[in-house]
Amino acid sequence: MVGYDPKADDRDISNVEVAVAGSVSGLVTRVLISPLDVIKIRFQLQIERLSRSDPNAKYHGILQAGRQILQEEGPTAFWKGHIPAQLLSIGYGAVQFLSFEALTELVHRASVRDARDFSVHFLCGGLSACVATLAVHPVDVLRTRFAAQGEPRVYKTLRDAVVTMYRTEGPLVFYKGLNPTLIAIFPYAGFQFSIYSSLKRAYEWALPAEGKKNGNFKNLLCGSGAGVISKTLTYPLDLFKKRLQVGGFEQARASFGQVRSYKGLLDCAGQVLREEGAQGCFKGLSPSLLKAALSTGLVFFWTAVSGTKSHRDSTGRAPGGPSGGAGRSSSVWQTLGAAAAHLLSPAAQRALLTLSGAAG
């Protein structure tokens, strides 16, 4: 369902369903990968080496960091900033997948290029991610601030964070780190979509029988591979973005070790290279790759599940068929129900899908 495919048999999916599918995929995935995201951000912001040999290093490994965060801040620390993170995931997923669908369809209708080409998916994936980033970047800054703070907390609530940041740093604080974000997100998302589609075709070529049967496993596996490759290729820019987003937030970082101030992207990159070496640009790569494998795989999995489930009514007929308009009106509810049902027991799945159909 990801991207426009003129040969697909499910092109009756509406724009609303595409947006909901992207939102559902982001929402479900965010709940699962939040602990890795918090650890990754802590690693990215640590000036000291991520090594046991450095006595000043607060964190030096994923398991050690997890234990220390749990001991010092409690289990809820792994979901710090979860509300803005969920807003980020829902908004970003909806805008990105809707934009990607629209752009690939535009390419198909306005040119002779195949909408499924690697180059088309790279370009449309990058552009759709930039559009989504512009829409939700303020929420990304809030998410980073919440995940970066320790105890005692500087920001108690989301409203407190917005008001405090606006009063002390001005409105532009919500767009800190935008330049490296846009520079990084275009190739990252472009590679995600294009590598995902390439891996799917390779999977279907290598295992033609399996490729047609295990669609959900294929989406999960190819999405995970695309996430790992894309993140590795663009990781330094993600680190620079995080460093810039916590600029002006140094007082909350004092208990974690050294702090730095940066004048911009080039200054940040230069300081990191001079003080921390080339390896400093890849701090937090391990949890980031784990997160990328899980999050990207699950996003493509949930989007495909949501999209294909949502355009069928409870009788299995396509919307707009003999059942009339009911299929279309109920499809959004069925998207949410079908996605959530995959996390539940068979009995709970049947009950949830029945309720989602009745809600329409």
Image (spheres, grey):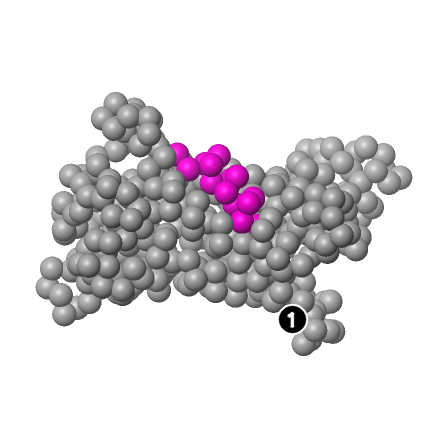
Q: Is residue 34 visible?
A: yes
Quarter of the image for residue 138 reads top left
Q: Residue 91 location in percent, x, y?
A: 51, 37
Residue 291 rendering spot, x and y as whole percentages: 42, 58
Left or right of 122 in this view: 136: left
Q: Is residue 156 above or below residue 250?
A: above
Q: Is residue 216 visible?
A: no
- Side (left or right) of 135 relative to 237: right
Amino acid carrying label 1: it is Ala
Look at the image and say whether residue 342 sits in the magenta stretch: no
Name the residue located 61 percent from the left edge and 45 percent from the top edge: 100
Residue 99, position in %: x, y?
Answer: 61, 41
Location of residue 326 (image quadrant): top right
Q: Residue at x 78, y 38 (%)?
A: 327
Q: What residue is disc 1 on?
A: 202
Front residue (pair 228, 32): 228
Main SS category, magenta section: helix
Instruction: Look at the image and give the residue range highlighted in magenta.
Output: 125-138
